[in-house]
Image (cartoon, rainbow, N blue to C red):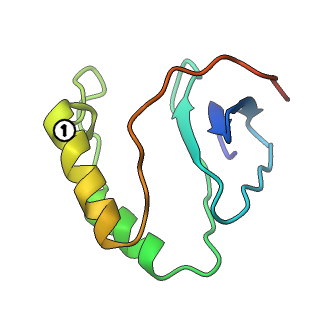
Amino acid sequence: MLEGEYEFLVEGRTLRSPAGALLYIPKGYLHAHKNVGEGTGRMLVCHTPGGPHERFFEEVGEEVRDRRRSRASERPEGLARTVEIAAEYGIEMPPPMKQTRAKESR
């Protein structure tokens, strides 16, 4: 994590990752993340091998111009389109599930 603080959900476990943290998620592990810090969050992500994942992020990525407004990808129609695009790249995005915090890690 380069800046801010993120919360990751990895195979049902919730992990908090502050700036400076390094997190490894093995291939095939179901995961999600969100910025839970008060300000801007930045992270450096490496996919090995790359290829399809890089093209997926290029296609669904969007520039944030106004942080007060929700991004298109956060609205239901935007999420549905992101799931469709993910499937084109062989990425599975199951619907959100309610999760309990199994363990927090710093």
Instruction: Tell me if residue 48 comes above or below residue 7 in the rendering.
Output: below
Judged from this view, the residue extending furthest toward the left is 77
- Rendered-image quadrant of the N terminus: top right
Residue underneath mark 1: 72
Query: Can residue 42 be seen in this snapshot?
Result: no
Instruction: List x then y, in percent, for residue 10.
Output: 67, 41
Instruction: List x then y, in percent, for residue 26.
Output: 73, 61
Instruction: Tell me if residue 59 comes above or below residue 68 in the rendering.
Output: below
Residue 98 appears left or right of 85: right
Pick whichever, 64 or 50, lies toward us: 50
Query: Can residue 77 be seen in this snapshot?
Result: yes
Instruction: Tell me if residue 26 comes above or below residue 9 in the rendering.
Output: below
Pick whichever, 101 or 68, lies toward us: 101
Judged from this view, the residue extending furthest toward the right is 106
- Rendered-image quadrant of the C terminus: top right
Look at 22% across and 23% down and name the residue there. 69
Q: Describe the element under mark 1 as helix, strand or loop.
A: helix
Pick whichever, 49 or 21, lies toward us: 49
Look at 59% across and 49% down and name the residue there. 30
